[in-house]
Image: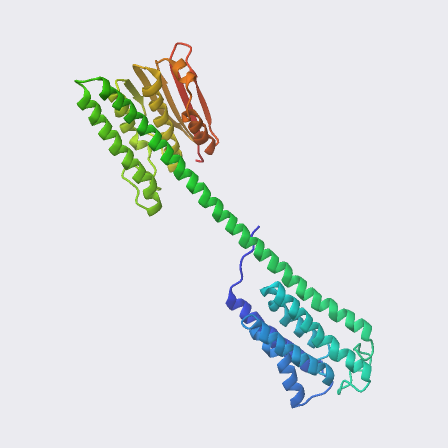
């Protein structure tokens, strides 16, 4: 359960009411009247209205007025509470200010009170008969004064500690979000570069060994290179809020762009059939992961499978997206040299709490099946 922050205007209004209440209580708790009593009571209470704006000056003024009031016999125990209220915002600022403020508050209450008790001639206005004061019960009143001021200081320390922890937690959350975003971008760049460089290398090898088909291979290299640059711009453009046409809202590729993957696979001599019925609304992050899994699976078909036919199926059910790629190639070739492709697929599936199944088919070939759940 989170706390609702109180507006500064409400706090200042509460402080103004507190100041009037303390000043009035100081007048009522003084067994005498006069201009001096009213003025000293005002100095004890009214500065509390500005205790959040100028905490240190207010504490200094209230503590001085409280010390004089203790010698004069004005305000009784109200002066103690006035100093405690003035100490609280000072103790919120920093540990050093809190320590100095507590020392000043204790001195302002204890020193004049114990001095009045020691002389026997103070305060100038005697307390009401039967009322506990430094003159009648110095030990008890001193203990109560220390407890009240220490309680104000402790409350401020607890609030200051909680605020520091909240700020640290916010900083850690921000740092984690930045790290996750960097990891996401690094994963996207890795997939784009790895996928397209493998195609470039394969077509470069074809161009080197085939004389009559060099032009076609070089055109493929050009197309793949341009496509890779566009993908990189889409990934990094998300940082500048410049999503591409075939990308999701964050600049990452969506399932609408799988047509390019299919055409690139067909251009490599693989007959591809596609099963992709109309898909319901799927979150952009799930679409990105599905796109990259398809990209990696089709790259493996071209590089390792020596396949002639490949079937791609993308289906969706309420709460899950399923991607399946099955080829008729030689699965053992991929098992002999497993790169980072399957590991990358597992990472993407794990991001969504899904499942990934890869391996040779009983009738030959290799199959990749990934299920990516998402909230409905």
Image height of 79 relative to 214, above or below: below
Q: Residue furthest front?
A: 208
| Camera sees residue 313 | no
Residue 131 picture location, percent across and down: 80, 78
32 lies above or below 374? below
Where is residue 49 shown, x and y percent of the image? 57, 74
Q: Quadrant of residue 286?
A: top left
Q: Please count the marks in the image.
A: 0
Q: Which residue lies at the image location 62% right of the left edge and 76% below the top edge?
A: 60
> Which color scheme does this rendered protein use?
rainbow
190 or 76: nearer the viewer: 190
**Left/right of residue 272 with respect to residue 290 in the rendered view:** left
**Residue 99 shows up from this direction:** yes
Outermost residue to the top: 363
Q: Position of residue 138 (x, y in %)?
A: 81, 75
- Please state if 276 lies on the left or on the right of 127 as rendered: left
Which of these two is toward me, 326 or 168? 168
Residue located at (74% from left, 67% from top): 147
31 relative to 1 in the view: left or right = right
Displayed quadrant of residue 235: top left
Q: Quadrant of the C terminus?
A: top left
In the rendered view, tell whether residue 161 sits above or below residue 221.
below
Q: Position of residue 55 (x, y in %)?
A: 58, 71
Q: Residue furthest bottom?
A: 34
């Amino acid at each position: 359960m989170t706390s609702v922050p109180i507006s500064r205007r409400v706090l200042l209004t509460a402080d103004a009411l507190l100041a009037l209440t303390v000043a009035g209580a100081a007048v009522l708790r003084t067994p005498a009247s006069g201009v001096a009593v009213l003025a000293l009571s005002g100095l004890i209470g009214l500065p509390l209205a500005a205790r959040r704006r100028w905490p240190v000056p207010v504490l200094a003024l209230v503590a001085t007025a409280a010390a004089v009031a203790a010698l004069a016999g004005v305000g009784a125990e109200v002066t103690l509470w006035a100093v405690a209220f003035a100490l609280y915002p000072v103790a919120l600022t920093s540990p050093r200010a809190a320590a100095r403020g507590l020392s000043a508050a204790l001195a302002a209450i204890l020193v004049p009170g114990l001095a009045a008790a020691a002389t026997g001639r103070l305060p100038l206005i005697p307390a009401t008969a039967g009322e506990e004061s430094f003159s009648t019960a110095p030990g008890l009143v001193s203990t109560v004064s220390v407890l009240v001021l220490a309680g104000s200081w402790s409350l401020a320390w607890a609030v200051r500690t909680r605020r520091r922890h909240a700020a640290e937690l916010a900083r850690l959350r921000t740092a984690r979000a930045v790290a996750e975003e960097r990891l996401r971008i690094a994963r996207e760049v890795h997939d784009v570069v790895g996928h397209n460089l493998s195609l470039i290398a394969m077509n470069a090898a074809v161009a080197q060994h085939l004389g009559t088909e060099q032009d076609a291979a070089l055109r493929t290299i050009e197309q793949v290179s341009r496509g890779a640059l566009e993908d990189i711009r889409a990934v990094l453009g998300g940082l500048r809020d410049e999503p591409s046409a075939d990308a999701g809202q964050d600049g990452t590729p969506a399932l609408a762009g799988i047509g390019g993957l299919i055409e690139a696979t067909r251009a490599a001599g693989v007959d591809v059939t596609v099963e992709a019925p109309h898909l319901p609304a799927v979150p952009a992050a799930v679409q990105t992961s599905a796109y990259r899994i398809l990209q990696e699976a089709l790259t493996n078909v071209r590089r390792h499978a020596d396949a002639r036919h490949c079937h791609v199926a993308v289906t969706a059910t309420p709460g899950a997206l399923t991607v399946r790629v099955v080829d008729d190639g030689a699965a053992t070739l991929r098992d002999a040299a497993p790169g980072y492709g399957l590991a990358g697929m597992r990472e993407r599936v794990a991001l969504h709490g899904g499942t990934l199944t890869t391996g040779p088919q009983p009738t030959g070939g290799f199959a990749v099946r990934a299920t990516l759940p998402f909230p409905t």
